[in-house]
Image (cartoon, grey):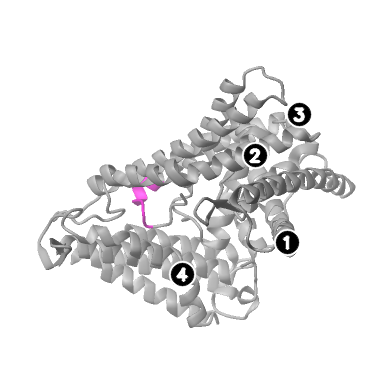
């Protein structure tokens, strides 16, 4: 889902930076206000955790493997605003140091993966889990649905961002200047692979991790989210 | 992946101030994504290769490092855009696949070449920046660009833990391999991955307390302070000015053609 430089027009990238600035500012203010001094390193550790979680290859039926993003999991563990900061940091490190995801597309990538994904996932989780006990199965199901919904909403957002490029940015003779696929191709392509493959990897990882957390005396039971 | 071998060499880009270098590279990336002619972007790509050579980055290594994955992946995904079914236009070539006539269009071909050239150039510049700059300096540049302290602090701390966590993951995989081998039934494999993520989180959470105590012992009072030892010289400003003139000239020539 990482968008490299050159897939989106500079105007689109600029718009997403403009959209993300108030979100980052708000996340930074909320984190500074609510963050206990002891939890400051937790943000960095959360970001590194989010980065490293992508290194775990999950076996999927048929002998293949895929990796999870873990955005919803981080949101459940740290809260949506802290997850926004942690995932943004992970994406910035990936873009700047490893060339994974473009620098010009950081705004768009953060909108999809550090805003849409954790917020949709977190509030879905809260809505479904309600006031159930921290060890109930309802929370595992809530986490699974939240993960599936979160990653697919992020994929839909990415698909729309790709899909609007050919109609907005093309030459006089119809040649696409950026992503060449229109909405009717980009959205099904992005959504299809996430609905069928990557969404399920996210579900498996998030649900199993939440289930294992329930078995332990962990942060999830202490309710120490930000 | 995390090696800084090339950043420590005495080359052209390594001699520049990290802030100026980052701004210069960003300028080139922005120019590459804004240009609309393959030839103009190709010129920038050539410049990137010259910068790589002058910065003592082996060219074969650089080409492998930049072409693997993103440009190759982009090349693959542009293939359907070559054909008239996706990009209608003036036919260039046609052939039959399973009895169906497939037409490659001029617009599709030009669009695909432009797309791949632009991505390759942008990715190459970014990788050149990360190869020729010490990662800790690159992260400190963020503060110079006005990014809030909480983000910069988190980024620089996160970077340090990446090494530790990457090593942890490597050890976990090695331990799994040595105990159960490579072949594992997929459901069991999923459980192992989930359990190890939980284990890693718990270790990370414990580490949080140690790190906080270490911060306190070094005088942390709740207000992060960042060290900055950047110093610009004459060469830095000349380089920045030359980049601005070059990018403006490319835009001017492209608009004239």
Per the rendering, the mark at residue B167 is: 1
Mark 3: secondary structure: helix
> How far apart in space, not on screen, are marks 1 and 2 (Cα)?
23 Å
Q: Residues within 10 Å of mark 3 (few under 14, many from 20)?
A: some
> How far apart in space, not on screen, are marks 1 and 3 (Cα)?
28 Å
Q: Chain of mark 3?
A: A
Do discs 3 and 4 share a chain? no
Part of the protein shown in magenta? A6-13
Q: Position of residue B87 (x, y in %)?
A: 18, 55
Q: Position of residue A99 (x, y in %)?
A: 51, 61
Outermost residue to the left:
B90
Mark 1: secondary structure: helix
Vertical relation: A32 (above or below) A202 = above
The tally of labels here is 4
Mark 4: secondary structure: loop
Q: Which mark is in front, 1 or 2?
A: 2
Name the one closer to the observer, B61 or A127.
A127
Outermost residue to the right:
B217
Res B166 visible = yes
The residue at the point 87 percent across, 45 percent down is: B213
Q: Chain of mark 1?
A: B
Do discs 3 and 2 share a chain? yes
> How far apart in space, not on screen, are marks 3 and 2 (Cα)?
15 Å
Q: Residues within 10 Å of mark 4 (few under 14, many from 20)?
A: few
Q: Chain of mark 2?
A: A
Q: Position of residue B148 (x, y in %)?
A: 62, 43
Per the rendering, the mark at residue A208 is: 2
Residue designated by label 4: B68
Residue designated by label 3: A221
Whether residue A9 is in magenta: the answer is yes
The residue at the point 51 percent across, 56 percent down is: A64
């Amino acid at each position: 889902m990482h968008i490299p430089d050159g897939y989106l027009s500079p105007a689109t990238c600029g718009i997403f930076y403009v959209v993300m600035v108030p979100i980052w500012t708000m996340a930074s203010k909320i984190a500074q206000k609510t963050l206990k001094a002891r939890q400051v390193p937790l943000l960095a550790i959360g970001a590194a955790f989010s980065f490293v979680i992508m290194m775990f290859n999950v076996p999927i039926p048929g002998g293949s493997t895929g990796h999870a993003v873990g955005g919803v999991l981080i949101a459940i563990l740290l809260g949506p605003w802290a997850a926004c900061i942690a995932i943004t940091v992970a994406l910035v490190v990936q873009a700047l140091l490893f060339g994974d995801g473009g620098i010009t597309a950081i705004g768009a990538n953060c909108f999809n993966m550090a805003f849409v994904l954790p917020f949709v996932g977190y509030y879905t989780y809260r809505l479904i889990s309600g006031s159930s006990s921290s060890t109930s199965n309802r929370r595992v199901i809530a986490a699974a649905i939240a993960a599936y919904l979160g990653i697919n909403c992020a994929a839909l957002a990415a698909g729309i961002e790709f899909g609007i490029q050919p109609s907005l940015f093309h030459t006089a003779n119809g040649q696409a200047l950026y992503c060449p696929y229109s909405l009717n191709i980009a959205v099904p392509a992005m959504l299809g692979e996430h609905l069928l493959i990557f969404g399920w990897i996210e579900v498996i990882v998030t649900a199993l991790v939440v289930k294992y957390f329930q078995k332990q005396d962990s942060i999830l039971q202490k309710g120490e989210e930000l | 992946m995390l090696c800084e071998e090339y950043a420590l060499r005495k080359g052209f880009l390594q001699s520049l101030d990290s802030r100026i270098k980052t701004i210069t590279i960003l300028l080139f990336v922005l120019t590459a994504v804004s240009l609309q002619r393959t030839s103009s972007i190709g010129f920038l790509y050539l410049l990137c290769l010259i910068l790589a050579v002058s910065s003592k980055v082996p060219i074969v290594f650089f080409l492998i490092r930049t072409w693997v994955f993103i440009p190759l992946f982009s090349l693959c995904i542009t293939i359907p855009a070559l054909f008239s079914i996706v990009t209608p236009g003036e036919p260039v070539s046609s052939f039959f696949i399973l009895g169906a006539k497939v037409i490659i269009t001029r617009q599709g071909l030009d669009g695909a070449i432009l797309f791949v050239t632009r991505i390759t150039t942008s990715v190459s510049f970014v990788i050149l920046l990360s190869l020729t700059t010490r990662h800790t300096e690159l992260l400190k540049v963020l503060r110079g660009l006005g990014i809030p302290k909480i983000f910069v602090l988190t980024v620089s701390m996160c970077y340090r833990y990446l090494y530790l966590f990457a090593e942890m993951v490597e050890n976990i995989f090695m331990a799994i391999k040595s105990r159960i081998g490579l072949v594992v039934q997929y459901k069991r494999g999923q459980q192992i991955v989930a359990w190890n993520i939980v284990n890693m989180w718990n270790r990370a959470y414990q580490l949080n307390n140690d790190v906080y105590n270490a911060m306190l012992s070094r005088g942390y009072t709740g207000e992060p302070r960042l060290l900055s030892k950047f110093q610009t010289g004459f060469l830095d400003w000349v380089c920045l000015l030359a980049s601005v003139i070059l990018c403006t000239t490319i835009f001017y020539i492209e608009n004239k053609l």
